[in-house]
Image (tube, helix red, strand yellow):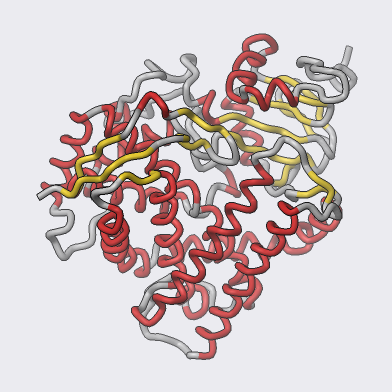
Amino acid sequence: MSNRYRPVPGPSGRFLIGNTYEYDSDRLGFLARTQREYGDVFRFSPTTVVVQDPELIHDVLVRTNAEFRAESPLVSGAAARFQDIIDRRLPVWMSTRRKGWRGMNSSGSVAYGSRLVGRFAAIMDEHAGREVDVLSVMRSFSGQAIADFCLGGRPEHGASVRAVAEAVDRAATAASALMSSSLTLPHWLPTPRIRRFRRTAQEVRSALLDQITRRRAAGDRPDTQDLLDELLHGAGAELTDEAVYDVLNVVLRASHGVPGASLSWIVRQFAMDPDLVARVRAEADEAGLGTSDAPLGTADLPYTEAVVKEALRMYPPTWLMGRDIVRETRVGEWNLQPGQHLMFCAYLVHRDPRWWKDPEEFLPQRWLGGDPPHGRYAYFPFGAGPRICLGNQLGMLQLVLATAWLATRFDIEVADLRSVVSAPQALLVPHGLRAVFHARA
């Protein structure tokens, strides 16, 4: 019988609610058990298919913007309007993304690296010596760090950076509350969560458009110091205000939560492994972190970069990714239809013994050899293809420098490692991680 008419296999679940209860009770456990029972492609619901084969995942990711699209509305009822916007604006949007990418590799990135360490030092010194919620502190840093990259190229922009960072944090928190739920609510339903989501998104939009208008009115500047400079006067000089807003909004949103979650996992790993801290500290001291005027990059700290890559492997913040099917297509042996959704779990792929040696061991040294330490396409913490996370290079710079600074400046005391649990919600975070950062003499 043709696969066109044969459904993808999967558990039927309970009457009316399907697999939602079992999934919400233990998300990672449910996906792992179902994969073992039904294979690397299985049905979660009548409209959602989970794909766990790295080759098939990569194929889907590189075909995004053709048969698949990346974005889905957080509330139902907006799909048709949303798809119309994507269809009309996609060519301009992809061109704008490329211009923003070039801006991230310009002189602004060099200047940003120096500011990054200073900003992280200020935040950590503020919290040193007292017990704090690690995720909150690290998320505050990552929000301010990405706002600084986008808008903070000159001292007079400091207030703007703080205001935008706070607005993005409120919007990200509101979006996370919706994304963490398995239910997609109707757009017309005036629930507090939906109202907050819409209000905070508008706050970000207003704040960014205000900064774009002000900076454009100030005229050209001879040097590029942040991404907005680059978009207004460099690679993106011909872009409209709306297109510039699109780039800033996506970079701010995409780079907000992931570094904070990853740094929190690294703090946990440091607390578990003093030898790991010592090796990162020795490399940072040799590179002159905090003592040299020359800006450092990831190439100057290869072992620290390996630690970050291993943290992103074992604890990928974007643990679950998805694509919407926009036209009839084929994935592996299965025919799929418009309106269906594909999901893939990076956490499980990154720990699959078919693709990794000793996948449950935290081994930074696996990244220091000449060959990839994994099966083909089995590592994708930032996605892949034309819609790869726009902030992946920036995120790595943030994470490597912050990790090195943590090891160099602080001894970390975690209150109770046994109380820390993995929380796979909108992002994968270490729930309950509290620590004291003791400044080193």
Q: Position of residue 58 (x, y in %)?
A: 59, 34
The residue lying at 87 percent from left, 19 percent from top is: 15
In the image, farthest residue toward the top: 37
| Quadrant position of the N terminus in the picture | top right
Q: Position of residue 311 (x, y in %)?
A: 38, 34
At x 41%, y 65%, the residue is 149
Occupied quadrant, residue 36: top right
Q: Is residue 374 above or below residue 439?
A: above
- Percent position (x, y) of residue 190? 82, 55
- Residue at point 64%, 77% (across, down): 240
Left or right: 95, with 309 as reference point: right
Residue 219 to residue 398: above or below: below
- Above/below status of 77 relative to 322: below
Q: Position of residue 3 (x, y in %)?
A: 84, 18
In this rendering, would 157 be left or right of 82? left
Nearer to the camera, 412 or 90: 412
**Left or right: where 239 falls relative to 406:** right
Name the outermost residue toward the front.
Answer: 130
Viewed as shown, does residue 169 lie left or right of 371?
right
Residue in front for this viewpoint, 343 or 424: 424
Total numbered badges shown on the rendered structure: 0
Judged from this view, the residue extending furthest toward the bottom is 218
Q: Residue at x 21, y 36 (%)?
A: 277
Nearer to me, 303 or 164:
164
